Every structure is written in structure tokens, then in C-alpha cells.
Amino acid sequence: MKRVGVFVCHCGKNIARTVDVERVAKELGAHPGVAFSQTYVYMCSEPGQALIREKIAEQKLEAVVIAACSPTLHAMTFGRAVEKAGLNRYLMDMANIREHCSWVHADDSAKATAKAAALVKSAVSKLQQGRPLTPIRVPLTRRAVVIGGGIAGIQAALDIANGGHEVYLIEKSPTIGGHMAQLSETFPTLDCSSCILTPKMVEVKQHPNIHLLTYSEVKEVSGAIGNFHVTIERKPRYVLENLCTGCGDCVPVCPVVVHNEFEAGMGSRKAVYIPFPQAVPSVYTLDMDACYNTDKLVVCENCYKACGPKAINYLMEPEIIEIEAGAIVLATGYDLMPIAKIDEYGADAYEDVIDSLQFERMLSASGPTGGVVRRPSDGKIPKEVVFIQCSGSRDPAHGVPYCSRVCCMYTAKHALLYRHSVPGSQAYVFYIDIRSDGKGYEEFVQRAIEDEKILYLRGKVSKVFREGDKLIVWGADTLSGQQVEVAADLVVLAMAIVPNEATKALARKLKVTTDEWGFLSEAHPKLRPVETMTAGVYLAGAAQAPRDIPDTVAQASGTASKVLSLFANEELLHDPQVASVNSELCRGCGYCLAVCAYSAISLEERLVRGHRMQVATVNAALCNGCGTCAATCLSGAIDHLGFTDKQILAQIEQLGEGA
Amino acid sequence: MADRTAIIIAEPASIPYFPGCTLKSHAPHFERSALASAGAVGLELVEMPRWVCCGTVYSMATDDLMHQVAPVRNLARVQAAGSERVVTLCSMCYGTLKQAAALIEREPAKLETINAFLTRDAGEPALEGRVRVMHLLELLAEEPRARALQEAVVRPLTGLRVAPYYGCTLVRPAEASLAGAGENPGLLEEVLAALGAEVVPNPYATECCGSYHTATNPEIVARRAHAIIEGARAQGAEVLAVSCPLCDFNLDRRQAEVRRLYPHFRPMPILYFTELIALALGLEAPAAEGRLVDPRPLLARLALVGAAA
Amino acid sequence: MSGAEHRQPQGAHVAHGAHDAAEWTPNIVAFLCNWCSYAGADLAGTRRLQYPPHVKVIKVMCSGRINPLFVLNALQQGADGVLISGCHPGDCHYQQGNYIARRRITLLRRLLEHIGVDPRRVQMSWVSAAEGQKFAQVIREVTEDIRQVGPMGQFRRAR
């Protein structure tokens, strides 16, 4: 039997008012195996902890029970205290006689005292069957994989790389930059978006610590924090990156014209293309799905012939790259909800009803209209434009109930820029509220309203339809109580921000949870916004929730700092309360594998008592310590350290004794 | 667009029919043409026994469980008669019954309360399980009736430029809308197209006619009717096809008030969509009685009435 | 009734032996999962919600840790009833441990009924970390159920 020390806390009057702590201490003092038992007013205080350390040494205690509050509060505190005295922290346990006893049985002191004593004895029994446990050293690969090359991924990658560690930045489109690259100007400063983004993009390309893999996707991820194994597929560009000079001679001769994703469907590109002139890497890509050629048959060689450096190769194959990484950052970004979802606004049947990214491309000097705002239907310059905020947002019936955060600001920006570009024009903004909470944001909106004379109408738009060559917009101005009808030339919808389609599939691969809208879930909404529940997987940017550029950049740096502190560890220590197999008893049935949610158990061939047998083997680094396998095993071969069968049975035996 | 994936296998050719009070009193021609048209495509609408007034959609405006008793009672009687479906023509009845059905499915505890009331206090059968509330348009859109309708046309409504008008109650709220499709069901357009008519797109198809305001404030209705009719006319329509006796009243009879407010207003005939079906199927022609604007001149001009074209 | 599972009596077999309800109080062992139910119980305490003192807690990391043999052992060792409480379906901290626990306990209860032990003695509940009120209610209800069933007289292990 171990020499167990029992410390019963008064917790001021919180416990002592109801539970007769002296009596409990006395009763425990007489309990077999208890070498020392005492009460103290506040065990968690400095003197309380000093008392524990003192008595461990003095009484040569081999295990300690602290009867006090819930372990959620002070298990760490007492764990550290006993370790200072040279006792393994897993030979310390707490009996919860406050939250589970004194506070809930206030009017029955006798019963509360009896129950408290029983709970303390139960803890003693558990420790008698316990063993010291040592945290498991897990190898730590100080390399990060950042998935998503928008501003969030770019910032995180730069910060981690500047912190001295290797980063793989994976982006599924041919260039990094994300949606920010599509923007013309950014609020509230009206900075040219490309001007502030491209330096960062170039920095990524040139950074010695960053490996940029564009036109690539993550296929598989296995492993755990410190030790992820990431399989990446580099899609074939059919253009040799090291030979392409970005001259663009291939484009004029290409006979195929398709929609340009970068132009949000407002413009076209050829099958061989570069998404935009400042793309990084500055390399062309051949979209084989659009090209007349197939991977088996070459019928058109125009681009090949036009290419000076001979960089075109129709026979390229996908390339698989496997990477070991210690941390993964998810920065896969957002999309806009499709207009087709809103019947009342035409469900995308009207050409002149567009969304905000499309309008952004029109404003852009390098966009499909050269920076001139035009109606998609006839190319005329619109004189009356209606902007509708909250299209799909804050709308459980048609879309999503949440607020997309950025639309009030970008709509003000759009209306302002439109008014600047078309003299004598009229802009209307239909809104529910104006959310302009950032630095300089409110002033910017007021400028739009007062200086630009944009008509802000507080009311939702109930219908948009075509009449002749105008779009009739029916809305309301609730502040004056009137219905409003506008015959507009162009309608711009601030469609709701939704998570990027790829995010859901990726979340499943990484066993990261998403909320009901598909946004990635953070570990704690208040206190852990950049981590996920999966250790080693972090979040940055709009993949987690809609946010603007300054918040995204700030968060991405925060994410990077988590990765850097992970990498700053000498070694990675894993909680030792994991599953453990007694290979002598294991018969290799595999039932435990079937119930493990973390794929932490595998069957390995071992020599057991002279026989070659399949034996369950636990990868402690992957084990999260739930114990389900231990309860499943029919042979009693796999157990849960810290919560072993013997420990639980000892507690049961103890608690079975009378009420 | 309407979701037509719910294809019922081995469905009966006869289905209980809930007429509602208004059809019996103010719109006998709607009912007559509907029953005849349905019969012609192999669907027997059998008036359900002991139906009672549904309460109309107005009663759904307050959160009072007592208002749900009437529609649930009707659904229970449909079930007691051995059917899992009931068909209606009246938009208000459709809306009321379907909203009630949706409520008790969402909140089974409320159904328990209503059932307790029905069985204990009223000595009536309880409602177990689901009764599906349908509109004739939904039934006509399903196979095999959709094809049967097309094949049964003997007098295609060629040249008739008709604007479909659903009114508001058939499409809102979304959970009680035609085929669950919300704002843009498309069912009426399909039926009219199957009859050979030229279906005119109508942005005002789901805009409210003014509804019960006709009783207290007819001017509101007159302005609404004007906007709706002129809106349809601007798209090229010569006739509006409606599906609700109240819409019919507001858009047809109230044209007198419209004329007073807008002296240059030209009348436009309003017809029930079932009257158009009955016409195309050679069953009966729309009459002048019971309406303000006589549709016969338009139909005669297009050679759609008189000897078969 | 709270959402705790397996509450309806299923033609239960009453325990052998008469019991004097006035003197005897039930002895109930509760297995609470660390992340949800244990935290929910803590919350009941923080809120000072009061409930009968006959339930004693054994903490496990996940309700999936509960081997049915533990439950039988508890009944043999002097418990009159056993409560297993975990996270709500879909919310298990370890993804699916609570589903596995639910299936096990369902089978166990059928087995108990088959061998003549009142299945009301073994109950499962889902209590989240935010449900202090629910936890207190569950304890009250389970205590009352066991009180009605009476002391566990069968299969007692000799001490």
C-alpha cells in the first residue's frame, strides 16, 4: 500500500459550513493506507501548497489526495505543487467535495459529511491502484503547412518563415492573392488593393523559407501535432514553370475563350492564361478542361508553337509530394453566396443584377471594363445604381442568419467610387443597419452619405425585376414610412459571405469540426480563436468567420505566433493518460481499432510467447485518452492509464459501502 | 423552381377534395371547371365528408392554438376517410391547412393538445401521422397527369397571351408554398403552356392583390389591381389567369374602382386557370355571369370559342 | 421529463425482499464524463442548486470508458443504482464515445431485465457543461426512481 496523504480544504466557509471537515480528516486518518490527514483553510493558497510540499517530505508520502473544489480549477496548481516536492503529479488526485457536495447539500450536513468522506476514500482507493506516469515525448517537426494562399495564408506564412522555420504554402488556384487580389481599392483608405498585396506576394515568392506550391491541393493528412504527414497533389499546368518567362505570346494564338474566374464571370480568358498580370508565380497555366486537347490527343499546338522558351508540355502529369510537418494552418477563405439563391432578386436571371465581387472587377482599372462601370446587358454606363446590403445575410429564410461583417463598408466604398466615376449619377443604398466598427470606418461611411450624397434608405428590398431596359427595385424607407420604387440601370447585391467550398472537404480530412454554416470551428469562441480542437491545426482568416483585411492580417499573425510557440518547444510532451496494451493478453481481434476515433491503434505483428501474432499497438502521440478501447476489449488487454480498470473497480468498491 | 422529385408510386386516381366555403358560395365556376378538368386527366376529386371551414389564413395571424383546431379537424377527417392526401383549390384553404400541418409536424406537443381536445371534448377522431395538403396545380404538374393534360387538349389556346397570377397566399410562407418552391413555383406557367397558350412572364405574379382590404378600403385594392394588370399588360398580356376567388374578385370586380381612379384604364378579363383548362379540353367555355369583365370577346377574336377551331 | 434516456419502466421485476422505505436510502454511483457531465455537475454546484446526497461521482474522461462490467460490479458491490452521463449525441469530445456508450448500456439494460434485475437501476443521461439545472434534475429523478425500485438485494458480493 502506498503512504497516502489527505488534505481536506475548508475553502473558507464554502466547504466547512456544510461539511464537517475535521471529522472527514479524522475519519480518513484512520483509513487503511492513509499515513497523514489534515485540514487547512485554503489549500490552493501559497501556505496551503507549502503545507503539501512540507508533508510530502516529512511523512514520506507516496500519493496525495486533496479534498477541495473541482479539479477543473486547481488540478494544475496542485500537480505542480506535488511535483516540486518530487512526487509524480499523476499520484495526486482531487476529491470534489465542494461543487459536488457542500454546495449542493447545504441543508443536510450529516449526509454531506458522509458523502464527502466517501468521495475522499474513493480518491484514495484510486491512487492506491495508480502508477506514476511520465509525459510522452513526441517528435516535433518544425515545419508548417499553410493551406490557402489568400491574404490570411500569405501573412501566416510570412510570419512563420520570418520566425526562422520552413513553410509550405499550398494554393489550389494558379496564383496566390485570393479575393483580395480581385479588389480594386480597400476601405477605408481607398488604398489600391494590388499595390498593398503584391509586395507581400512577391515576398512570399522570394522568401528562402517558403516553398510556394500553387495549382496544388492537399489530398491526405495523417498523423498528429508535431508529426503530420501531408500528401499534396500538384496539378499539371502543362507549362514548365522554370522555362516560362511570362511573355504571354501563347495567349493571342489560343482559339478557346472561356469565363475568367478571376473576373468573377464578368470577363473572359483563353485556355492558356495567367489569372492577372501580377500573378505569383508569374507563370502561365493551360486549363486542359477548356483546351481542345485532351491528355491523350493533341489537336491544337498553337501555344506550343508560339512559345519561345518551349515551355508548353501537353503531356505533364500530376505530381505527388509528401511532406512532414509539425503544424498546419487552414486559411482557405470565403466565397459569396450565389445570386441564384434569392428568387426575389431574379435568381441570377437578370444580367444587370450583379454581386459585389463582380462590381469590384468593374471598378478595377485592370478589370474587364477597364475601370468603367457598365451594364453587363448592353455595355451602357448606368446613371442610377441600387446597392442592396444584406442579400442573404441576416436572413434565415433565404440564406444565413449571421452578419457578413464587411458588406456595409464595401458597399459604402462601391457607392462612393461609382459616384466619383460617373458624374451626375445617383446611387441608392438599401440597408438594415450600418456596421462600421473599425478604425476610420464610421467616418468613411459618413463621408459617403454626406459628401457623396448617396441616398441611404433603411429598408429591405422585396423585389427586383426587369421592365423594359430598366430594373425595377421595390423597397421601403422605414424611417419615413414610405414605400420606395427605383427604376435602376444596375443593381449590386452584397451577397452573404459563406465558407469556400473546398473548406468542408478539407475539414473532414483533418477531422476539424465546422459549424452549421461550414465555417471552421475554433477551440473556444472567446479565448482560443486561432486554434482548432485538433492539436496542431490552426485557423486564419475568413475560413473561420467573415472578417475584413486588417482583422484577417492580425489574426493570421496571431496564428503564426501559436505555430512559433509550438516550434519553440525543446520537445513536445503528450499527456500520458493514454491507452496501453498488454500484448500478452491481446488476441488481435481488432475491436479496439474499430472504436478508436483517432486511428491511434493499429495491428502489428509481434512475437508473443513464441507465436507470431497480430497485436494491438497504440500510437501514444495520436491517442486522445478517451478510454473507449479499454471498455471494448474482451480480453482486458488494453487499458486506460490514469483511469485503469483496477482504479475504477477500486473506486466502485469503495463507493459501494453504504449511503 | 418547383421540386417535382416526390413522385408517388401507385397513387390512387381519386383523392379527397376540400372545397372551402368560398368556392361553394362565390366561385362555383372555379369549382365546376376544376372538377371537370381534373376528371379529364384521370383524377377524380371526391368532396371529403364533413368538411368544415378551415378558418382561413387570417386566423393564423395570432398564436392561438385554438385557431389550429379547425384545420387539424379537417385533416383528421381526411385521414378517417382513409386518405393521406387532400387537394384544395382555394389559396386561403391551401395556406391554412398546409401551415397547420407544418406547425404540428414541427411541434408534436401541440398536436397532442389538439388531439386531446378533439377526442376528449369533441368526441372526434385524432390526427395520427401526416396528411399531405396539395393544390390542384401540384397534382397537375405530376406525372402521369402532366402528359395526360397535354394529350387531352383539343382546342389549343393558340395566340392567347396569358399572364399567370398566383397571388400571394400560394407562395408564402415558404413552408406552406406550392411545391415548397417559395417565390417561383413555375407550376401555373407549365400548365398554361401545356394548353398551348402564350405564357407572358409576369413580375407581378406573386404580388398581393390587396386581399381583405377590399372590404374596408377598396381604394387600396384598386391601386394594387391597377399595378398588377398594367404590369401584366406591359409585358404583353391580354388576360390574367388566377387561382383564388378573392384575387378574382379584387382583380375583376374591382376594375370598376380602378376605372374611377384611372380614367384611361382599359378593362382586362380575369379567368380562373381551370376555366382555361376546361376551354382547351373542349369541356366548357367561360361564361359572362359572375364577373365584371366579359372574356368572350377576347376569346371569340382568337377563335377560341364558337365552333372548334 | 428531462431528456435522460431509458426512463420508462419496462415491465420491471421488483427486487426480492421487502424493504423499509423509511430507513433505507438509495446508494447510487454516477459515472460522469469529464468534458460535459462533470462540468455540468460543477455548474449545478456553482449555482448552488440543491439535490439529494445519495449519488457519488466517479469521473471518467468519456462515457465510452464505461465497461458494462463496471455497472454490474457496482450493483454487486453495494450500489442500488448506477447513472452514466455523457455529452449530447453529436457533441462527444472524442467524436463518438457517447454513441458507443449508449449502445452498450441499451444492451446491458435488456440483459438486466432478462436476468431479473429492474432495468431502472441503470440509467443514462446526456448533460452538457452548460446544463447545471438539468444535472440537478437528473439526480433528483434518478434518486426517486431508485427509491421506488428499492434496495438492490440480488447478486450481492460478500464483503
Image: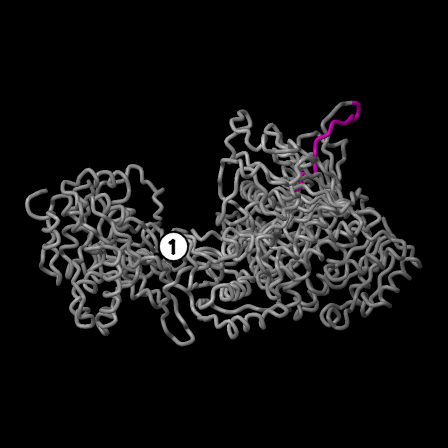
Q: Quadrant of the C terminus of chain B?
A: top left
**Magenta stretch holds residue A603:** yes
Front-most of B241 and A110?
B241
- Residue A104 location in percent, x, y? 65, 66
Residue A124 vertical placement versus B140 (above, below): below
Q: Nearer the viewer, residue B285 or A178?
A: A178
Q: Residue at x 59, y 31 (%)?
A: A304
Which residue is painted at 73% across and 70% down in the image? A14
Front position in the image: A634 or B249: B249
Horizontal relation, residue C76 to residue B47: left or right: right
Q: Is residue B104 visible?
A: no
Query: Viewed as shown, does residue B222 lie left or right of A179?
Result: left
- Callout 1 amino acid: Gly
Q: Position of residue A254 (x, y in %)?
A: 52, 36
On the question of residue B212 being in view, the answer is yes
SS at mark 1? loop
In the rendered image, the vertical position of residue A302 relative to residue A417, given as above or below: above
Q: Residue furthest right?
A: A58
Query: Does residue C40 appear to the left or right of B267 in the view shown?
Result: right
A191 in relation to A578, above or below: below
- Badge 1 is on which residue? A346
What residue range appears in magenta?
A598-610
| Residue A39 x/y as whole percent | 82, 66
